[in-house]
């Protein structure tokens, strides 16, 4: 009976040794792969793309939220002041048609053709 248990014990030690060797080989392959210059370069480039994309998405989200909070009279996409600051005088000194309920920088209303005065 002791021979059986001795055999089981030797088998278990052998399996344990094989598992340890396998773990060492897997770990060494991972370390070698991470220290490979090509792998480092690829990871660096992919992280640069990731952060650039993330910054762009966050910037677009901030701009979209800012645009959604502005009324049509305050927002003008070509104005450089709309980056979180109050609108400039270029944006606020608009001609406003009360009949059509819309603002424009022209002297005439684009919808009804009425002559407009500048509103302040």
Image: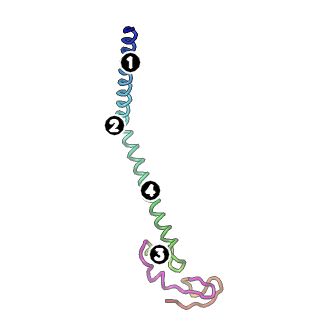
Q: Position of residue 71 (x, y in %)?
A: 53, 77
Q: Secondary structure at mark 4?
A: helix
Q: Earlier in the sequence, mark 1 or mark 4?
A: 1
Q: Let me know if residue 93 is in the magenta part.
A: yes
Q: Nearer the viewer, mark 3 or mark 2?
A: 2
Q: Earlier in the sequence, mark 4 or mark 3?
A: 4
Q: Secondary structure at mark 1?
A: helix
Viewer-nearest residue: 89 or 11: 11
Q: Position of residue 6 (x, y in %)?
A: 36, 11
How far apart are labels 4 and 3 at the CA level?
Answer: 25 Å
**Residue at mark 2:** 35
Q: Earlier in the sequence, mark 3 or mark 2?
A: 2
Which residue is pictured at 35% across the width and 33% down the height? 32
Disc 4 + disc 3, Cβ < 8 Å: no
How far apart are labels 1 and 4 at the CA level?
Answer: 51 Å
Quadrant of the image occupied by residue 10: top left
Q: Nearer the viewer, mark 3 or mark 1?
A: 1
**Residue at mark 3:** 79
């Amino acid at each position: 009976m002791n021979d059986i248990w001795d055999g089981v014990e030797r088998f278990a030690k052998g399996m344990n040794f094989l598992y340890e060797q396998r773990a060492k080989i897997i770990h060494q392959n991972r370390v070698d792969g991470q220290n490979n210059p090509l792998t480092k370069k690829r990871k660096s480039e992919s992280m640069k793309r990731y952060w650039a994309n993330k910054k762009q998405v966050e910037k677009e989200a901030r701009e979209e939220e800012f645009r959604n909070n502005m009324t049509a009279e305050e927002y003008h996409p070509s104005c450089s002041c709309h980056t979180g600051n109050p609108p400039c005088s270029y944006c606020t000194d608009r001609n406003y048609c009360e009949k059509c309920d819309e603002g424009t920088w022209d002297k005439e209303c684009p919808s009804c053709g009425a002559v407009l005065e500048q509103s302040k």
